[in-house]
Image (cartoon, rainbow, N blue to C red):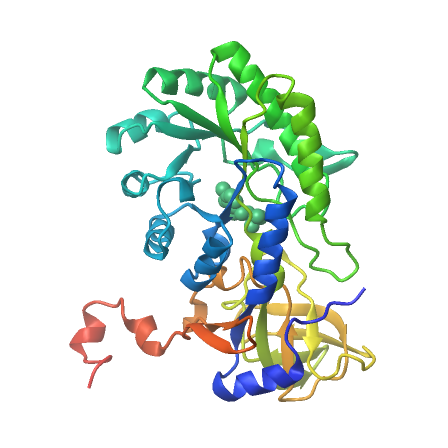
Amino acid sequence: MKKTPFVTKEQLDRIVEQYPTPFHLYDEAGIRENARKLKAAFAWNEGFKEYFAVKATPNPTILRILQEEGCGTDCSSLTELMMAERVGFRGDDIMFSSNDTPAVEFQKARELDATINLDDITHIDFLQKCAGIPKKISCRFNPGGVFELGTDIMDNPGDAKYGMTKEQLLEAYSRLRDLGVETFGIHAFLASNTVTNEYYPRLAKILFELVVEIRETTGVKIDFINLSGGVGIPYTPDKEPNDIMKIGEGVRKVYDEVLRPAGMGDVKIFTELGRFMLAPYGCLVVRAIHEKHIYKEYIGVDACAVNLMRPAMYGAYHHITVMGKEDRPCDHVYDVVGSLCENNDKFAIDRKLPEIEIGDLLVIHDTGAHGFSMGYNYNGKLKSAELLLCEDGSVKLIRRAETPEDYFATLEGFWNETGGDHE
Ligand SMILES: *Cc1c(COP(=O)(O)O)cnc(C)c1O
């Protein structure tokens, strides 16, 4: 299989005339088409709603596009709530799935009437004190142990800091009901970046059976089940992408087997996808600015881990296309590196690529989620611009690149006293 960028060399050559590299570029048509597919896959469930995980791609223009496609937002911090508010999300359009939550964030979530998804049983008292208990609330479940699909271990919930044990969960629902809560939800996130159509159906079965048990033991009826994130994308070209229609069908089957016979055929299904909604519809566009021949062959580009942290942080693979050389043989082996004084700042290691010349444009694929947003400012490096390739083929700047002034703006005392940032 081959990964083809959503933008052509001709388009990119025009874009870089106006906007210098590096930048993240997003594909509006791809985002919309994918969001519609997700909606179609769950159309069998009347209350279905996707709450886009804002942390994946916190840009108001992107949020607006998803809003137009009927999505809400999943926030987990003050600024994510503020951004959602500014774009016009409120009330049932906002899920607040945070953890280790500061009081001001609960207060903001209550002000926006967001659905709070409680990460822990001790947060009931904390929330009651700092912001009051709302009429609608969700609780996050952690089954512990390892999460298996067939013979594969998908992830390790027992080691994860999130959610409540089953005993805590049952107690939490009873307490919340006694505190006046009328509408209840449940949430679990058990495996990340799953590239299989089986993850959601498996998770759904666990949650659906639990929801039946919760009603039997506590009398609390769950109104919505939040399957959260975790549906992944194939970063490597050899993997088959998930089929969202099959995933939706798989969840429907379990719904019909478990919930309908229990008289719960009106329970709403929610998702909080981030990666699946955006990752393939964004790329990082960089230019080769150096080549270096020592014990290995290096290509230095004009971006670094500040612009895309996943390879440095997780050893993640991101496919690279050398624009204009798609059909040339991959007969060179390179480390494609950034400029940080940090040896893990490598976008690719021992990657077979066509011969790269200084000035070549490289597209680093699948950076639309957890790409720009994980950025930081190590080495005083600045975050890049974000551009939107619109459906009509035009290009819009949706976030300008940081400037040195932005970087220095938070310094107090010395910087201002010495007049460093004015005059
Ligand atoms: C990160 C996160 C998501 C999104 O995860 P993806 O892997 O991007 O789908 C959803 N919900 C919560 C609570 C998260 O922390």
Q: Is residue 112 above or below residue 321?
A: above
Residue at screen point 27% across, 70% down: 409
Residue 283 sits in quarter = bottom right
**Who's the residue at 57% across and 37% down the image?**
227
If the image is split into quadrants, where does the N terminus sit?
A: bottom right
The x, y position of residue 337, in whole percent, is 61, 74
Q: Is residue 147 visible?
A: no
- Percent x, y of residue 2: 78, 67
Q: Is residue 130 above or below residue 382?
A: above
Q: Quadrant of the C terminus?
A: bottom left
Q: Position of residue 323 (x, y in %)?
A: 68, 81
Q: Is residue 230 left or right of residue 375?
A: right
Residue 200 versus residue 185 in the image, above or below: below
Which of the pair 93/157 is nearer the observer? 93
Q: Is residue 236 left or right of residue 129?
A: right
Q: Is residue 149 above or below residue 261?
A: below
